[in-house]
Image: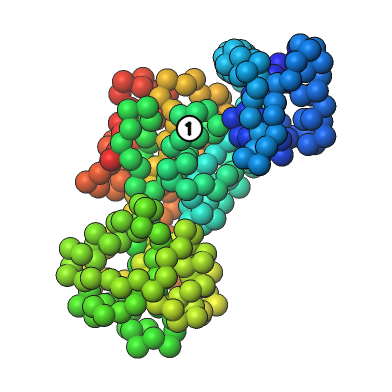
Amino acid sequence: MHIETLKVFCDIIESGSFSYAASQNQVTQSAVSQQVRSLEEKYDCRLIERGRAGVKPTAAGQILYNAGKEIVRRFIELENRLREIGSVVAGSIRVGTVYSVGLHELPPYLTEFLRTYPAVNVHLEYLRANKIYEDLIEGKIDLGVVAYPAKRSQIVTIAFRQDELVLIVPPDNPLAKHAKVSFDELDGQRFVGYERDIPTRKAADRILREHGVKPVYSMEFDNIETIKRAVEINLGIAIVPRLTVEHELSRNTLKLLEFQEGTFTRPLAIIYKRGRELSPAIRKFIDVLTTAQPFQKSNGAERPEKPERQRADRTADSGRAERPEKSEKAAQERS
């Protein structure tokens, strides 16, 4: 049995999808099906069942998966050690993140990383925050980049950067005449927001509540792009990360307002499963995220030229930024 075939099989079981396994291993879906057939012919039994709920292992398939995932893990660790000795940075990285971070925060970092390490393949997946934690623990992804990282014993957290939260309104909204807004002016306004279980929505509600505002939501969505479109067509106003609306500001389809009461930030963090050995590619990726300087001046405002790690350390729910090369006992987790 080839290790590559065993890895494909494990990816199918973990994802419940032939197409996902194909994309992760850079082969066609027909090649994945052929590899499964070769395993079933080798062991003379069915290993996978297809149904409406997706792909499930048979009893024999579960036995193969339970043992196979450990074999694949050990083989990958062996490859990583050999690459470290040979100073080769290659392989693949599976990163899970939310839309607002993946679409607006990570692109310049990804560009810098791929320019420096062209032999590495980065697979970026857009997931809900709770799914990122689940997939990390189950080994379906290597890293997560999340907002308001949750404190979990199985997860190591590294401070990444801070987003400034701002208010966006349509250009014809009376509030759009001002550069700043007071929370007193927001009482009675209709809001568009994230769905209630999303960390950024919880944070926005907390900020409004602390300043005496009881928001009335006209619409709720699970991603930043739909929220912006709803504000553009005057369905409400929204609190969003500043970096996510730069395109709309340049086109004058939205107006941005800062808060008179002060600056409010959203902490972002890199997370990975505690106890797993990080490959050279993953270590370098984390290094680029925590040290690169991808942002320049934008829309007349000075953007951070490097991750605001010191600022992140001062937030109430963040720990000291931790480099992955240090021992995991020293790694701080943020709530």
The one of 334 and 83 positioned closer to us in this rendering: 334
Query: Is residue 209 in view?
Result: yes
Colouring rule applied to residues: rainbow
> Is residue 322 positioned above or below 176 on the image?
above
Q: Residue at x 70, y 26 (%)?
A: 48
Rendered location of residue 144, percent (x, y): 47, 39
Secondary structure under the numbered disc 1 in the rendered image: helix
- In this rendering, position of residue 213 left or right of residue 219: left
Q: In which quarter of the image is residue 317?
A: top left
Local crowd at mark 1 within 10 Å, few (<14), some, or many (≥20)?
Answer: many
- In this rendering, position of residue 265 left or right of residue 46: left
Count of numbered badges drawn on the protein: 1
- In this rendering, position of residue 204 left or right of residue 129: left
Q: Name which residue type carries label 1.
A: Leu
Rendered location of residue 163, percent (x, y): 37, 56
The one of 129 and 91 positioned closer to us in this rendering: 129
Check disc 1 and report the residue beneath it: 136
Q: Residue at x 35, y 71 (%)?
A: 217
- In this rendering, position of residue 37 left or right of residue 146: right
Rendered location of residue 204, percent (x, y): 30, 61
> Which quadrant of the figure contains the C terminus?
top left
Q: Quadrant of residue 153?
A: top left
The one of 136 and 197 positioned closer to us in this rendering: 197
Q: Residue at x 47, y 40 (%)?
A: 132
